[in-house]
Image (spheres, helix red, strand yellow):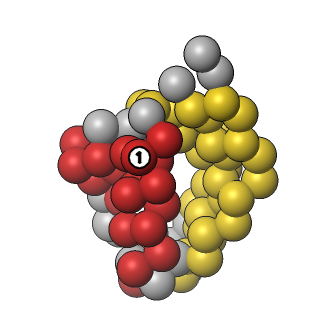
């Protein structure tokens, strides 16, 4: 399994969306929220994605199409 830590940052248009739910549901990745700060106008969340590398790559590619700022922080590949 692969673990990737990413920061997601978005404005008002993203705060009300179920983005983390879609990651779990549509891309077969496990999402662990490590830190977050969300209000009505702005939000950021640091999450760890866990799963097969192909699923994490697809999930990350989709996140980039949402208009969120996506920043990869750390990657670990396990056996």
Q: Quadrant of residue 69?
A: bottom right
Q: Is residue 19 visible?
A: yes
Name the residue rendered at 51%, 32% in the picture: 50
Q: Residue at x 48, y 75 (%)?
A: 64
Q: Residue furthest right?
A: 73
Residue situated in front as seen by the camera: 64 or 32: 64
Q: Is 10 situated left or right of 51 in this image?
A: right
State the image quarter where residue 19 is shown: bottom left
Most extreme residue toward the top is 79
Q: Look at the image and tell me in which quarter the C terminus lies.
A: top right
23 versus 61 height, above or below: above
Question: Under tag 1, what secondary structure?
Answer: helix
Horizontal and vertical percent position of residue 11: 54, 81
57 is higher (above) or lower (below) than 1? below
**Residue 42 visible in the snapshot:** no
Above or below for 73 versus 62:
above
- Whether 29 is drawn above or below 13: the answer is above
Q: Which residue is farthest left?
A: 26
Q: Nearer the viewer, residue 7 or 36?
A: 7
Residue for point 52% across, 25% down: 1
- Badge 1: residue crowd in 10 Å (few <14, some 14–19, many ≥20): few
Furthest residue toward front = 79
Residue highlighted by disc 1: 54
Q: Position of residue 43 (x, y in %)?
A: 59, 67
Q: Position of residue 52 (x, y in %)?
A: 43, 34
User: Could you tell me which residue is drawn at 46 percent across and 83 percent down?
Assistant: 67
Q: Nearer the viewer, residue 33 or 1?
A: 1
Label count reads 1
Horizontal arrangement in the rendering, residue 58 relative to residue 3 (left or right): left
């Amino acid at each position: 399994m692969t673990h990737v830590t990413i920061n997601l940052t978005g404005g008002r248009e993203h705060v009300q969306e179920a983005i983390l739910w879609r990651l779990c549901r549509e891309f077969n990745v496990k999402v662990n929220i490590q830190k977050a700060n969300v209000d009505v106008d702005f939000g950021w969340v640091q999450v760890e994605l866990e799963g097969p590398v192909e699923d994490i790559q697809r999930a990350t590619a989709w996140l980039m199409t949402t208009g969120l700022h996506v920043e990869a922080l750390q990657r670990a590949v396990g056996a």
